[in-house]
Amino acid sequence: MSDSELENANQQRVTDEMIEEQIKSIQHHHMDGNSMVCSIVLKNGFSVRGSVSCVDPADFDSDKAMELSLEKAKKELYPFFGFMLAEDKYRSSNK
């Protein structure tokens, strides 16, 4: 596959890199002793959140909670980025 074919194929699917390059900020908030919320704000101002909780606050692992809540927040972005790709493809084919 040529470089241009590879680039075109990558534009037809959402990638981690595509999402990463649009992230403006990431914040984590530890709540109620057993929950973590991660907020991602994109460069265009759009934001999503991911959260995790455990039953017993004694079992709460802040590092693991930060990792999991970030992962969940990023997963929230995939459908939106997929929509953007589909919209771009639609608009370019209807010119």
Image (cartoon, helix red, strand yellow):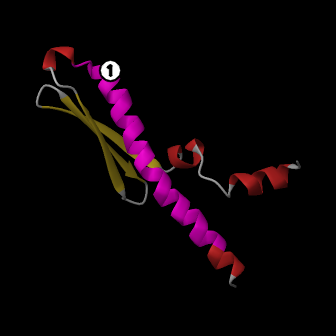
**Residue 55, picture quadrant:** top left
Outermost residue on the top side: it is 58
Which region of the structure is painted magenta? 60-89
Q: Is residue 56 above or below residue 35?
A: above
- Please tell me how crowded label 1 is: few (under 14), some (14-19), or many (20+) other residues with Cα within 10 Å: few
10, above or below 89, in the image: above
Residue 17 spot, x, y in % from top left: 58, 43
Question: Image quarter for residue 4?
Answer: bottom right
- 33 is higher (above) or lower (below) than 37: above
Per the picture, the main secondary structure of the magenta-coloured stretch is: helix
Left or right placement of residue 92 versus residue 2 in this view:
left
In-front residue for pair 52/67 = 52
Residue underneath mark 1: 63
- Indicate the quadrant where residue 51 lies: top left
Q: How many marks?
A: 1
Residue 74 in the image: state x and y as whole percent: 43, 43
**Residue type highlighted by circle 1:** Asp
Indicate left or right for 17 with 51 as reference: right
x 84%, y 49%: residue: 3
Q: Position of residue 48 (x, y in %)?
A: 34, 51
Quarter of the image with the C terminus is bottom right
Task: Determine the residue located farthest toward the front in the rendered image.
Answer: 55
